[in-house]
């Protein structure tokens, strides 16, 4: 049975759900602006690099031990691992890998790449019908769009965040379901059911912030898995709630955003204002909220030719929300360190950068880094807007005071990484899992993806392909 033959009860969808389903099923590559296509290509390559680097992370390794002990091998590859699992489990593992080292993109649902890309490529493995590279890119764009729109309908990142929800896990399943549905070729009715089912699979809380627990990384993988599962269930006739976005008891927005919901955000500018355009790529291996401070202290050091020995102290004035999320100084675990703004600043001063190497256990325990970390002081300014970047003041040992606020940190939508930087980052990360020739082949394939008749060409480069069989 093909996905287009699946039967099920008709869904009398509410207007937003129906509009999102139509958008998902009717979007075409030729309708995408060139800038959006280029952006999608960059985010796809960046996500693959982040996932390949995270393929041997603690979280991915533990997850693979659990899955391979209980699940038979299948035909959806685990990137960089040389094994294959079911499409659902591959999406789970690849999503965790993509988010494991805090190098994946931000500004979507929030971490849309780690959710949407694993789901889209898992769906490629789930259908016997070849999916073109152009269709895959379109599905990725659509997934980013839907995921972000759901977050905006919750009132935006900060209201949803401050309520305790991790938007990657709560809003991500909708984007993953949209991308998977587009790849699988579900009709509008089935896609509406997939999106509706994704609402029931939503979840993810910020409790990890208090001790650096690994659960944060799992949220991206679970969201990717949820979207693939929702699409496959819808393909086989399982129904979802038509009122998932309705102002009804149990509706997604009333439940998760009772005081901040903005339902109009689900459809305003749909098909015209592409949400992937507002997403950012990370040059640093830390929470996006630390990047402005890294850039600010870096510019001060570079402009005045200062070293760690010259720094008497660093004062960072920031808003309460960022402080609550990134104000800790616990660096005992990698997740905790990557959420620490003081450590990010100290690493830039002591080590010259805040890339992945700066977060190695050896560097986190470095006496030099620790001594600089002790000189970083945070001041919470209740008057600062939640979207205002921190103000960094560096005082030298000879009494000079230098102040800097970076409003458009490197990698943001308003200060993007160029193509060369995106490719260089990919090669640096992917080389941790793939040999040079394979890494080059992946980058080349993504660069010309829209010319491919079968996107499995890309999938097969990411792992060791196994014989395929029809899955639907």
Image: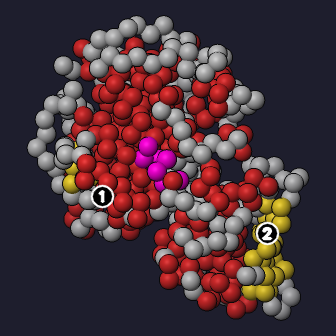
Return the residue found at the far front: 70
Could you tell me which residue is drawn at 56 percent across and 83 percent down?
365
Query: Which residue is drawn at the image coordinates 62% and 52% (left, top)?
Result: 207
- Does the magenta run of residues contain 418? no
The quarter of the image holding the C terminus is top left
Query: Taking 143 as reference, is 392 left or right?
Result: right
Q: How many marks?
A: 2
Q: Which quarter of the rendering shows the N terminus?
A: top left
Q: Is residue 241 visible?
A: yes
Q: Residues within 10 Å of mark 1 (few under 14, many from 20)?
A: few
| Marks 2 and 1, how far apart at CA | 41 Å
- Please report the residue visible at 66 percent of the width from the left and 77 percent of the height from the top: 346
Q: Looking at the image, can residue 268 be seen?
A: no
Q: Does residue 54 appear to the left or right of 302 in the view shown?
A: left
Range of magenta residues: 216-222
**Residue to which mark 2 is pinned:** 378
Can you give x and y, in whole percent of width and height, for residue 410 in the image? 60, 60
Residue 292 horizontal side relative to residue 402, left or right:
left
Vertical placement of 196 versus 46: above or below?
above
Q: Could you tell me residue 315's position as x and y percent?
A: 80, 73
Q: Which is more toward the observer, 22 or 333?
A: 333
In which quarter of the view is residue 456 placed? top left
């Amino acid at each position: 049975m093909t996905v287009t033959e699946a039967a099920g009860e008709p869904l009398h969808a509410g207007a937003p759900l129906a509009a999102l389903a139509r958008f998902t099923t009717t979007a075409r590559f030729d309708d995408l602006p060139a800038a959006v296509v280029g952006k999608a290509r960059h985010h796809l390559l960046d996500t693959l690099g982040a996932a390949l680097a995270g393929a041997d992370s603690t979280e991915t390794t533990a997850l693979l031990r659990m899955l391979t002990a209980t699940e038979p091998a299948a035909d959806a590859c685990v990137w960089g691992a040389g094994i294959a699992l079911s499409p659902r489990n591959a999406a789970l593992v690849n999503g965790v890998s993509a988010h494991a080292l805090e190098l994946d993109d931000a500004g979507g649902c929030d971490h849309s790449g780690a959710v949407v890309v694993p789901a889209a490529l898992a769906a490629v493995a789930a259908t016997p019908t070849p999916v073109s590279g152009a269709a895959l890119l379109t599905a990725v764009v659509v997934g980013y769009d839907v995921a972000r729109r759901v977050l905006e309908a919750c009132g935006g990142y900060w209201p949803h965040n401050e309520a305790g929800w991790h938007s990657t896990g709560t809003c991500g399943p909708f984007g993953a379901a949209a991308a998977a549905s587009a790849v699988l070729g579900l009709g509008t009715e089935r896609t509406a059911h997939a999106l509706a089912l994704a609402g029931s699979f939503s979840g993810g809380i910020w409790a990890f912030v208090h001790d650096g627990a690994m659960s944060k990384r799992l949220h991206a993988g679970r969201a990717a898995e949820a979207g693939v599962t929702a699409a496959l269930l819808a393909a086989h006739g399982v129904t979802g709630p038509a009122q998932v976005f309705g102002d009804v008891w149990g509706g997604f927005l009333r439940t998760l955003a009772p005081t901040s919901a903005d339902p109009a955000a689900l459809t305003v500018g749909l098909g015209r204002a592409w949400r992937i355009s507002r997403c950012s790529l990370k040059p640093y291996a830390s929470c996006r909220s630390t990047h402005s401070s890294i850039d600010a202290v870096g510019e001060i050091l570079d402009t005045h030719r200062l070293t760690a020995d010259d720094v008497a102290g660093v004062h960072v004035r920031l808003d309460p929300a960022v402080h609550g999320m990134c104000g800790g100084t616990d660096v005992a675990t990698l997740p905790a360190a990557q959420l620490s703004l003081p450590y990010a600043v100290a690493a830039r001063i002591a080590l010259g950068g805040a890339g992945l190497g700066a977060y190695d256990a050896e560097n986190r325990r470095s006496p030099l880094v620790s001594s600089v970390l002790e000189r970083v002081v945070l001041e919470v300014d209740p008057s600062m807007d939640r979207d205002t970047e921190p103000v960094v003041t560096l005082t030298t040992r000879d009494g000079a005071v230098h102040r800097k606020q970076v409003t458009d940190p490197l990698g943001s939508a308003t200060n993007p990484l160029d193509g060369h930087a995106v490719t260089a980052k990919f090669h640096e990360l992917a080389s941790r899992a793939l040999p040079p020739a394979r890494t080059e082949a992946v980058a080349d394939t993504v660069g010309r993806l829209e010319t491919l008749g079968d996107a499995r060409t890309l999938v097969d480069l990411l792992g060791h392909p196994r014989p395929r069989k029809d899955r639907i």
